[in-house]
Image: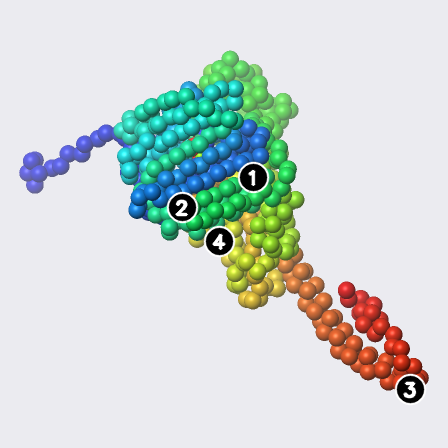
Amino acid sequence: MTAESVLEETFSSISPAEFFYRNKQMAGFSNPTQAVYTVVRELVENSLDACDTARQFPDVQVSVSNPVSDEVVITVSDNGTGVPHEQVPDAFGRILYGSKYSSRQRRGTFGLGVTMAVLYGQITTDSAALIHTRPTNNEGREYRVLIDVQKNEPIVDSVQAKPRETPGTTVTIHMRGDSLRSRERIIEYLRLSAVGTPHAQILVNITDDFKDSFGPYDELLPPLPQDNKPHPRSADVELLRRIIKSSPTKSLEELLVNSFQQLGRKRASKILNFLNFSSRTNVSNLSRKEVALLSDGLRKFDGFGRPDSSCLSPIGKESFVKSVQASTNSEIIDYACTDPSDCDGFPFIIEAVLATGEMFPTGKVPSLYRFANRVPLLYDPTEDVFSKVIRQLNWTRYGLDSGMRVAVYLHFCSTRVPYKAAGKQSIASACNISEEALTLLRYLGRSLRKRVRTKRNAGRAERRMRKFESYFETIIESAASLADIDHFPDSAHMVKSLFEVE
Ligand SMILES: Nc1ncnc2c1ncn2[C@@H]1O[C@H](COP(=O)(O)OP(=O)(O)OP(=O)(O)O)[C@@H](O)[C@H]1O
Ligand SMILES: [Mg+2]
């Protein structure tokens, strides 16, 4: 081989916007149908988060129109916090920028959703996103925002004052997409969103031929989850180093006690003793090796309490049962919820409702409706931990026969949902999530078996009673004619009381 024929690699770096521009499918934009669904989903998610923060009962309006053949216009409007004016360009025009990187449960996670919608609209129709927002105590303004993809920077095309009666935000995206094919998914998504957020009302208008309203199913505003300190089990080397950097003058013991939950002085000094550290060591004197040792010790110590779960917002028994029942007209069999557990120090709870009703399909396994942080997950079911776990159980053992219509609604809530991809469609089988889900489903399986047995026994008693009733009537009639009376006592009532059947 001659020297001239050797190819030389060219190295460069790309911005996050450029990365997602090249890998749209990773964020839920695989095809025109999924793209429309994803934009609706991301906008609605943001609206519901903004209403939670504003402590408002969500009033979310979704409109999907189709002005030109394959061009779709999606508008979502809410009565949430609004967006501070100085934040609008970055929040909508910079990928991986957001206000939800803190440690309480929210629907949004990455700082990617709406910016991906803006990017997709821009690259498919060359249109700017329209953001009309009014933050509390401020005026309404309308922005037209685009993204400089190579630099990952916002471009504000125009901004003008536009009054808005109450605080909130309306986002409009023009994009290429298939509104017809995405229609059923969008309707299903919105219907289930109202189940996951039972205090929300969601109005929808799809191309003027489908108009409906979902929820509210409950009048209770759930408490706002709290931002908590990290759990020591989440203290990897990077986190420890950041904490040390933010308080370089502290002693080791002070740092641990002030920065983590579940770590009082007694426990901190026990761990430090065990690891041969002095409690009084100044943290800025720690070497890289010592920081790694400390991180390892914290992650392996098994005497910590479970993480504080006040940062989570489960739907709760009453609201979850109400929303499932009202949205499906079904009969609830049971509700169950795991104790708070944690995945690498991040708390999680799984809650579930088991229901039976005409609208669910029949099958050997109950139909599964998945939720993560109150958001319904509709795509990638086969990849999901819950889909795998539900199939591990033999439901016939729990009395399910193929003619029955049973469904399980499973809600995973956590400050860090281990999504399998940036599109947030399926949950990975991390830590002990499978085991916890399995325990929960077994419990529900037993409830199902109890229900099936009670129904079966009631059916048997009823059949016996009917037979007895017919004999009893003949006996009464014969006895009455022998006694020569023409007034018969009420045999049905007597039989029912004998069999204790209503
Ligand atoms: N309707 C809205 N009301 C108030 N703030 C909003 C609204 N839509 C977007 N924002 C702000 O814009 C930020 C960026 O939104 P984006 O959807 O890109 O990310 P995210 O919601 O933080 O996370 P995710 O990528 O998981 O959706 C949000 O963090 C929020 O602060
Ligand atoms: Mg979002």
Rounded to the nearest whole Å, what is the CA distance between mark 3 and mark 4? 69 Å
Residue at screen point 64% across, 37% down: 220
Rounded to the nearest whole Å, what is the CA distance between mark 3 and mark 1? 69 Å
| Residue 495, quarter of the rendered image | bottom right
Which mark, residue 482?
3
> Picture coordinates of residue 320 (x, y %)?
61, 45
- In this orientation, which residue lies closer to the viewer: 498 or 19? 498
Residue at screen point 42% across, 33% down: 171
Q: Earlier in the sequence, mark 2 or mark 1?
A: 1
Identify the residue position indicated by label 1 in the image: 200
- Amino acid type, mark 4: Lys
Q: Earlier in the sequence, mark 3 or mark 1?
A: 1
Which mark, residue 388?
4
Rounded to the nearest whole Å, what is the CA distance between mark 1 and mark 4? 30 Å
Position of residue 343 relative to residue 11, above or below, is: below
- Amino acid type, mark 1: Ala
Q: Residues within 10 Å of mark 1 (few under 14, many from 20)?
A: many
Residue 19 visible from this viewpoint: no
Q: Earlier in the sequence, mark 3 or mark 4?
A: 4
Identify the residue position indicated by label 2 in the image: 207
Q: Nearer the viewer, mark 2 or mark 4?
A: 2
Q: Residues within 10 Å of mark 2 (few under 14, many from 20)?
A: some
For ligand 1, give the image quadrant. Answer: top left
Q: Earlier in the sequence, mark 2 or mark 4?
A: 2
Q: Nearer the viewer, mark 3 or mark 2?
A: 2
Q: Earlier in the sequence, mark 3 or mark 2?
A: 2
